[in-house]
Each structure stands twice: as structure tokens, then as C-alpha cells.
Image (cartoon, rainbow, N blue to C red):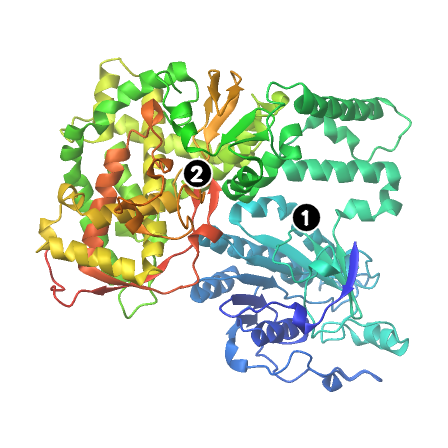
């Protein structure tokens, strides 16, 4: 727990940020709105009454708010937008969020105090005791739940999400006897913050709270305010709404924290960094406090994992019973023995890596949960060399040689299948769907969808608009194409103007796969891992039900279309493949094809827009090679040298499979060392393609490197589709799709980047595949072509 004093200088620049703040017409809310606005944010204030832009002077003897200096400098009312809204009304609240659009910070501040004595009784005309109104619960709790729900809905679509701040109260920790319902509502908010803490990671968001002590505003009843002021007790200032970190020296650091509550008293801000139980020894006693705190840590780490044996650790009233203590000691001893084995006796003990990674799964759990594991692994390779042990039985390779050594074996381990003995049969069964003849048959389907996409983005993202989120539109067209190919019909996202629910499930599903992959590495949980995260089962069932329904539909009809699923359906009818296996394959193809292609398109387009000379050169090449839109074909586009260089460079700089393609070691030699059989191994694509030993200026987007015969760059280091028997079956299909789309889009439009601060490399997160930032773009149709061109 850290106490510190903060000033205006500690609050970061918020220019370009959008804030939604409830209860901002006066008091703490208005003070917070002033701070956000003074730091450059656009603040949307929601309240039932208009904003009082003058300090509300609360007339209590000896205390004049109007005389307090404004520490934060001039305040521009233009940057504050007022919305009249009853926060208890779901429809009104939802309507405001819809009008606002993108949101970075949501402050659930609206609150009311009790107007009636809880212990006074009111009777109706028949003499019956009336139920209290409990408006306090509606405003202080229900409205906050609704604000949080709407914020998370926004963050899930935006990716990454923003910040939620909830105004609780010191009465959550020290209840006020004259305000029992108010105190209970604020305690519930602290519980909400704690409960949502582990879940916020999947939204790329944070949730925190501030618990003000006595703050003289309209909310605090005069009878409570007067004695506090007259006694000279410290009073929280409304002008300062800021948030500290664990150490005063870290206040200005860039890191975000989550699930914390700050207690404010006077000018002092105290961070309550531990679970509530750990702060209340007088409630539970030392023994039970320790156990409840430990249980909360475990549940946070496993994200809803329920370990039944731990339930008996909560609120043990008889600490003399030694069975639980014995189990605790055994657990600690087992953990120590496992660490010692991993460090000194494991077959991979001799390989270098971070201590946490060599000794346990913690290093992997920490970095995979952040979505930045590819960067963390790259840093470890810079430190330890071409082979790094990142978890007890896992080796990452960061060399060109490892590509062929790991993936070039004749016997090798489609998709998630790591067993070499099963992989070959899968590949042989699916290869016909990706043959050159099949590609020629499939191009018409792909081209028709791309034509539809090109026409729609010109309308939705016209020069007069605010632009469109091209990241999402790339996902929509990619999944529509893969829906046609894998499920026999489009998802119709382009027609609807929004992603289909199935493709929306994909991102969430991939996050859960990351969690499950971690849990499955724990011996005792390996078989039960998928049942430990209830939300995963829900997402997985929705995914499977939709895929099975589509497969049943295809099997029940006859078609001459040459898509993936039609070829597989024939094998099912012949008895070569069962329906469940077919369902699994088409679902994997749709996810892998849709996500990887959309990732490449979004990242590469952002790189082009940030390099105008490169964009002009590739655009000129395309327009100079095709006299009309109708002349553009995939085969012709693939003969354009600079376009191919742009594609190769985009795949190098932002490889869709940056985390590596894992397989099980058969036992082999590399870099003078024997890699034991059974170890999980992979080449870190991100590490290899961003290594200065392989590419000059590896973080720069330079397509010319792929055309320069004298370049010293090691081109073989970039293998975005892997290679050998492990290579991606859909490679040629992906090249056809991206060549057609880029050629047709750049032939038709000039592009303008709206959010020039977007940075895919810094902001992207990897959970099996990429979670990508928003890419907002406007489109200007070329002046030399007609707006009514037939497509």
C-alpha cells in the first residue's frame, strides 16, 4: 500500500482521447471533467441537470469552495459536451453511448445519497408498512453496472479497449451508520472492480476505482459536512482526480494497472493494492486472511478456474485442524521440488532462458496473457542466442537454420496437430482443395466478393466521411470469402455492414485457446482444462453448432461449385472422412484463412499509408499495368514486381504467424546441440524477421529489399507460411486473394489515413493470431474513372 501526493503535472496528456463521464454536472464529476478537458480530452458529461460551470459553493460555515484555486489552469467549456440523461434508464444510457462512438475512458461517477432515514417507517393508507424506494441502489449500483456493460461492449469492438474508472467511497471500507444503503452500494462497487479485474484482459482494458473520503459537495448532507469542517479534519479536494501506482517514482511510467482502488483523504492518495481480505486482518484473523488472499491470487491467475479443494480454505473458524495446513505444506514442497527438477534434472536443463521460464510456467503465463509474447521472446533471443528455453519443456529458435531443421523433415507434424504421424494424412486429404486447378475454379468466387468490397468501401469511407475502420472491413471481406469457400455460402458481413456473429466469436475463441494452452501444460489440469473456463465452453459450443449446421446443409444438397467444402463433402459421402472431422477442418480453414489474410491486409495497408512514396510507387505500377478494372486478374497481378515486393515485405514485418508453429521434437542436432525427443519446439518468426543479422533496418518497411539482387538481407529468414510438409496449404489461395484485393482497391481509389498515430507493431497483440488496432481510412475515387463503373 503506497501513499503519495499528486499534482496536475502527474496527469498525462489526454489530447485525442474521448471520455464518457456520468454525474458530471457538479461536485467530483465536474472536477474530473475539468481535469480531463484541461488535459486535452473531449468529455461527454451525462447528467439529469445541466452543467454548473461555476464552482458550486456549499454554504457551510468556515468552508467556501468558491475560494479554492483551480490548480489545473484554464478550462475550455468547448471540450465538454453535455448529454441530458437519466443514467438509471437503460435506453437513454445506451443511446448516448451510440451517439458518442469510440470511447477511451469511461468514468461511472453518478451517485446519490440517502434522503430518508432508513429506520423511519412509512405506512400506506391501509396501515401497511411501505417498501423503501431504494433509488440509491438504482443510481449507485444498477446504473454503474449498466455503464460498465456498455463500456465493455465498446471496448470489445474497438480492441484494444480503454479504461473504466468507478467512483466508490471511503464508506465502502468504513461504513457510515447514518447512510447504510449508500455505504452498502459503494461496497458493492469495490466488489465489482475486484470481480472484473481478471476478465478485463480479454478486452485489452482496465477497471479501477477511486474511494473519496469526505468531499464537500452537494452530495454530502450538511449535517455530516458541518462537524467535519468545524473539527478541521482533512477533506478531499474535488479538483484532483488522479491515480497513482505502487511506488511514487512510477507515477509517470507508461504501464497500466488494473483492479485497484485508491482511497483519498485530504491531499493524500493511498493505493489499496491488495485484495480487500488482505486489508482486513481484524475481520478474518491472520490465518483466514492469508488463505482468502491466496485463493484470490489463484483465481485471478487461472481466470475463473475453480479448484474445489481450495474452497475449504475460506473462512476456517478452527485453525487447529491440521489437515488443511498439511496440504498447504505439501503443495509448497511439491512446487519447490518441481522447480529444482526443471532447473537441474529436466532434459532441457542445459538450455539458457529466463529463470522463471526455466523453472516454471510463470514466464509463459505472464507474457502470453499480455499478447506481447512475440516481443518478449525476441528480447530473450537477443540476450541468450539462437535457442531459448521459455518454459520447462519448450524451446524457441531464432535462427534461419531452424526453419529447415524443424519444419523440413520428411516426417512432420495441419492446424493444431503437432503429432507427425497424424499430420501427413490430414494434409493429403485437404491438398486437392488447394491445387492449382482448384484455384482457377475458385478465383471467380473470390473476385466477386472483392468487387463488392471495393464498391462498398468507396461509399462508406468517402472523402466526406470520417473514414471507416479498414481493419474491421478487411476482416469482413476475408471471412465472407472464407465463408464461401469453407461453408458454401458467405457470412454476408459486407451486406450487413458489420461482422457476422461467428467471425466475431473468433477473436474471443483465440484468446481462450491461449488460456487453455497454458492450463493444459499443468499436469493435473491437462485433461480438464477446457472445462475450467465456462465462457470458453459457451464460445466453443456456438462455434461448433454453427459449423455443424453448415456442414449438414452442404451434405444435404448437390452443387457444382469448386470450393473447399464441396470437395470435402464428396469424401464424407464416400466414407473417407466422417462429419465431425469435416466440421473441424472447415472451421479451422475459415478461421485461419480469414484471420491471417485480414491481418496481412490491415498491417500492410497501414505501412503503405505511413510511407507515401512506397504507396505511390505500387499504385502507379498497378494503374500503369491495367487499362481497366476488368483487366485485373490474380495471375496478372502476381506478375507485378513491386506489388509482390510490397506483399513480401508486409509478411516479413508483420508475419501473421508471429508466435511460431509448434511441433514435437523427434530428436535432432542443430547449432551443435542435441534437441531431446518430446520437447516442444518452434521457430519464432517475429524474432528471425526482426533480427538485424538477417535484415538491414528490420523495423522499417522497405519493399525494395526484395528487388535488390545485391542486398545483404537473408531473404530465407522470412517464411510467413512456414515450409516443407508443415507449410501452409492455403498459401497460393492467400496470394491470389491479397493480390486481387490490393490491385483492385489501389487501382480504384486514392487512400487517406485518418488516425496517423496508429502503430500496428506497438499496439498489436497476439493470442494465437493477431488482435489488431483500428485503421481508419478515407477513399477518394480516381478522377480518371467513372463513379458509375460497372463491377
Name the quadrant containing residue 636.
top left
Residue indicated by mark 2 = 688
* Image location of residue 549, percent across then percent down: 32, 30
Q: Residues within 10 Å of mark 2 (few under 14, many from 20)?
A: many
* Image location of residue 204, percent across then percent down: 53, 50
* Image location of residue 464, percent across then percent down: 28, 71
Residue indicated by mark 1 = 194
Q: Nearer the viewer, residue 200 or 667?
A: 667
Image-based side of 780 in relation to 790, left or right: right
Q: Earlier in the sequence, mark 2 or mark 1?
A: 1
- Residue at 14%, 64% in the rendered image: 787
Image-based side of 306 in relation to 60, left or right: left
Give the foreground label among 2 and 1.
Answer: 2
Name the quadrant containing residue 128.
bottom right
- Residue at 63%, 47% in the rendered image: 197
Mark 1: secondary structure: helix
Q: Residues within 10 Å of mark 1 (few under 14, many from 20)?
A: many
Relative vertical location of residue 53 with respect to residue 554 in this rendering, above or below = below
Amino acid at each position: 500500500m503506497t501513499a503519495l501526493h499528486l499534482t496536475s503535472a502527474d496527469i498525462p496528456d489526454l489530447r485525442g482521447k474521448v471520455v464518457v463521464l456520468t454525474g458530471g454536472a457538479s461536485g467530483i464529476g465536474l472536477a474530473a471533467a475539468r481535469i480531463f478537458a484541461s488535459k486535452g480530452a473531449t468529455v461527454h458529461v451525462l447528467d439529469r441537470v445541466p452543467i454548473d460551470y461555476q464552482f458550486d459553493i456549499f454554504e457551510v460555515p468556515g468552508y467556501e469552495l468558491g475560494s479554492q484555486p483551480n490548480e489545473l489552469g484554464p478550462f475550455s467549456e468547448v471540450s465538454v459536451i453535455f448529454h441530458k440523461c437519466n443514467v438509471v434508464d437503460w435506453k437513454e444510457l445506451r443511446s448516448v453511448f451510440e451517439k458518442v462512438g469510440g470511447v477511451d475512458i469511461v468514468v461511472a461517477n453518478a451517485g446519490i445519497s440517502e434522503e430518508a432515514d432508513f429506520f423511519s417507517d412509512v405506512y400506506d393508507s391501509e396501515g401497511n408498512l411501505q417498501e423503501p424506494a431504494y433509488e440509491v441502489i438504482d443510481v449507485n449500483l444498477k446504473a454503474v453496472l449498466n455503464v460498465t456493460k456498455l463500456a465493455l461492449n465498446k471496448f470489445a469492438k474497438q480492441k484494444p479497449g480503454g479504461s473504466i474508472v468507478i467512483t466508490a467511497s471511503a464508506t465502502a471500507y468504513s461504513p457510515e451508520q447514518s447512510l447504510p444503503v449508500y455505504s452498502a452500494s459503494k461496497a458493492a462497487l469495490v466488489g465489482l472492480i475486484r470481480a472484473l479485474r481478471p476478465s478485463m484482459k480479454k478486452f485489452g482494458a482496465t477497471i479501477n476505482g477511486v474511494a473519496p473520503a469526505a468531499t464537500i459537495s452537494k452530495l454530502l448532507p450538511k449535517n455530516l459536512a458541518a462537524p467535519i469542517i468545524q473539527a478541521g479534519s482533512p477533506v478531499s479536494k474535488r479538483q484532483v482526480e488522479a491515480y497513482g501506482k505502487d511506488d511514487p517514482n512510477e507515477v509517470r511510467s507508461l504501464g497500466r494497472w488494473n483492479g485497484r482502488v485508491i482511497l483519498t483523504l485530504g491531499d493524500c492518495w493511498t493505493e489499496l493494492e491488495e485484495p480487500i481480505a488482505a486489508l482486513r486482518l481484524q475481520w478474518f484473523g491472520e490465518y483466514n486472511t492469508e488463505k482468502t488472499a491466496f485463493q484470490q491470487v489463484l483465481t485471478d491467475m487461472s481466470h475463473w478456474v475453480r479448484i474445489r479443494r481450495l474452497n475449504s480454505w475460506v473462512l476456517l473458524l478452527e485453525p487447529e485442524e491440521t489437515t488443511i495446513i498439511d496440504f498447504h505444506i505439501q503443495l509448497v514442497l511439491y512446487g519447490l521440488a518441481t522447480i529444482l527438477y526443471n532447473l537441474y534434472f529436466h532434459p532441457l536443463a542445459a538450455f539458457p532462458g529466463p529463470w522463471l521460464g526455466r523453472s516454471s510456467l510463470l514466464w509463459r503465463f505472464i507474457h502470453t496473457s499480455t499478447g506481447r509474447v512475440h516481443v518478449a521472446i525476441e528480447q530473450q533471443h537477443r540476450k541468450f542466442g539462437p535457442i531459448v528455453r521459455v518454459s520447462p519443456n519448450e524451446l524457441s529458435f531464432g535462427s534461419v537454420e531452424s526453419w529447415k531443421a524443424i519444419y523440413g523433415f520428411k516426417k512432420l507434424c495441419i492446424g493444431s496437430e503437432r503429432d507427425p504421424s497424424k499430420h501427413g494424412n490430414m494434409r493429403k486429404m485437404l491438398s486437392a482443395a488447394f491445387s492449382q486447378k482448384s484455384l482457377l475454379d475458385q478465383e471467380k468466387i473470390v473476385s466477386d466478393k472483392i468487387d463488392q468490397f471495393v464498391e462498398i468501401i468507396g461509399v462508406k469511407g468517402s472523402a466526406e466521411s470520417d473514414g471507416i475502420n479498414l481493419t474491421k472491413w478487411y476482416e469482413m471481406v476475408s471471412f465472407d470469402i472464407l465463408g464461401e469457400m469453407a461453408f458454401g455460402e458467405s457470412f454476408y458481413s459486407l451486406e450487413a455492414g458489420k461482422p457476422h456473429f461467428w467471425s466475431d466469436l473468433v477473436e474471443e475463441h483465440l484468446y481462450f485457446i491461449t488460456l487453455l494452452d497454458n492450463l493444459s501444460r499443468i499436469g493435473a489440469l491437462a485433461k480438464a482444462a477446457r472445462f475450467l473456463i465456462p465462457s470458453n465452453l459457451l464460445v466453443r459450443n456456438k462455434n461448433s453448432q454453427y459449423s455443424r449446421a453448415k456442414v449438414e446443409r452442404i451434405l444435404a444438397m448437390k452443387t457444382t461449385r469448386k470450393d473447399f467444402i464441396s470437395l470435402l463433402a464428396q469424401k464424407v459421402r464416400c466414407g473417407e472422412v466422417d462429419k465431425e472431422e469435416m466440421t473441424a477442418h472447415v472451421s479451422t480453414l475459415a478461421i485461419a484463412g480469414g484471420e491471417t489474410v485480414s491481418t496481412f491486409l490491415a498491417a500492410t495497408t497501414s505501412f503503405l499509408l505511413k510511407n507515401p512514396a512506397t504507396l505511390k510507387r505500387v499504385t502507379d505500377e498497378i494503374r500503369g499495368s491495367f487499362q481497366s478494372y476488368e483487366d485485373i486478374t490474380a495471375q496478372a497481378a502476381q506478375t507485378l514486381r513491386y506489388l509482390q515486393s510490397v506483399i513480401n515485405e508486409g509478411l516479413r514485418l508483420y508475419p501473421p504467424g508471429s508466435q511460431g508453429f509448434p511441433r514435437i521434437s523427434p530428436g535432432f542436432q542443430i547449432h551443435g546441440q542435441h534437441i531431446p525427443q518430446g520437447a516442444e519446439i518452434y521457430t519464432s518468426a517475429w524474432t528471425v524477421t526482426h533480427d538485424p543479422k538477417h535484415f538491414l533496418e528490420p523495423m522499417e518497411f522497405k519493399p525494395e529489399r526484395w528487388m535488390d539482387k545485391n542486398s545483404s538481407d537473408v531473404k530465407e529468414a522470412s517464411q510467413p507460411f512456414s515450409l516443407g510438409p508443415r507449410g501452409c496449404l492455403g498459401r497460393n489461395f492467400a496470394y491470389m486473394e491479397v493480390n486481387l484485393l490490393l490491385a483492385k482497391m489501389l487501382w480504384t481509389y486514392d487512400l487517406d489515413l485518418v488516425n496517423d498515430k496508429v502503430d500496428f507493431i506497438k499496439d498489436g497483440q497476439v493470442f494465437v493470431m493477431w488482435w489488431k488496432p483500428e485503421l481508419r481510412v478515407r477513399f477518394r475515387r480516381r478522377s480518371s474513372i467513372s463513379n458509375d463503373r460497372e463491377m
